[in-house]
């Protein structure tokens, strides 16, 4: 099964595609979508959706995991990132891809067993789990792979639970 993990943003959207066969998780590709701060928001959202469509056609994932938003301070940022997440969800839905959402806490717990893990701890686990030579760059891509791994782990646990 192929899973795309997505870390939403307006300026940068991280993405990572993994393949899960049994208990083996293999990274297929990762990267980011960047938009110019000079463009109006609607153009940036269109660019995110268009680039994501290309990725979905290229890698044909069956499921997607998208980070849930958590903001405590900047409402303006929260709104624009929420709009980017909406464009992402709509694009995934148009392709008929099953979507799951995970909070940063859930991702941290899934990868490190510690909900207050810092970014480097999560990225180090991504590197180890996927047997990569180095931590994926940019950070958004590493975060997207972490989100995909979180979903793969959640599915594995559900399958184990359902087989009993």
Image (spheres, helix red, strand yellow):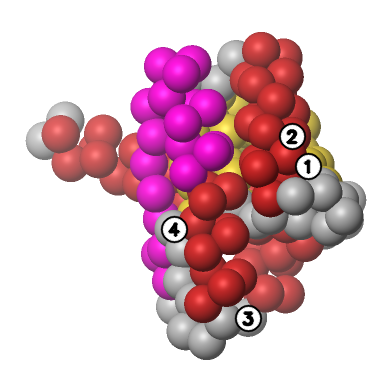
Of the residues under marks 2 and 1, which one precedes in the sequence? 1
Spatial separation of the CA atoms under disc 4 and disc 3: 17 Å
Q: Which mark is residue 47?
A: 2
Report if residue 130 is visible in the image.
Answer: no
**Residue at 18% of width from left, 41% of height from top?**
161
Q: Is residue 91 magenta?
A: yes
Mark 3 burial class by Cα count in 10 Å: few <14, some 14-19, many 20+: few
Q: Where is residue 89 in the image (x, y as percent from the top left)?
A: 46, 37
Q: Nearer the viewer, mark 4 or mark 3?
A: 4
Q: Is residue 117 magenta?
A: no
Of the residues under marks 1 and 4, which one precedes in the sequence? 1
Q: Residue 118 carries which label?
A: 3
Q: Nearer the viewer, mark 3 or mark 1?
A: 1
**Mark 4 — residue?**
68
Task: Give yes or no for contact between labels 2 and 1 (Cβ–Cβ under 8 Å).
Answer: yes
Mark 4 burial class by Cα count in 10 Å: few <14, some 14-19, many 20+: some
Secondary structure, mark 1, is strand
Spatial separation of the CA atoms under disc 3 and disc 2: 31 Å
Q: From what the image shows, is residue 128 above or below residue 49?
A: below
């Amino acid at each position: 099964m192929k899973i795309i993990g997505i870390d939403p943003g307006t300026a940068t959207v991280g993405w990572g595609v993994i393949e899960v066969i049994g208990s083996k998780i293999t990274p297929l590709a990762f990267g980011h979508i960047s938009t110019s701060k000079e463009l109006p928001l609607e153009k940036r959202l269109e660019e995110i959706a268009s680039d994501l469509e290309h990725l979905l056609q290229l890698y044909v994932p069956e499921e997607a995991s998208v980070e849930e938003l958590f903001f405590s301070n900047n409402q303006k940022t929260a709104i624009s990132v929420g709009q980017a997440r909406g464009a992402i969800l709509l694009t995934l839905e148009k392709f008929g891809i099953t979507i799951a959402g995970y909070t940063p806490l859930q991702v941290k717990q899934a990868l490190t067993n510690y909900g207050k893990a810092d970014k480097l701890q999560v990225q180090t686990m991504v590197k180890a789990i996927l047997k990569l030579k180095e931590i994926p760059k940019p950070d958004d891509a590493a975060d997207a792979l972490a989100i995909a791994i979180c979903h793969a782990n959640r599915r594995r646990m559900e399958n184990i639970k359902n087989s009993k």
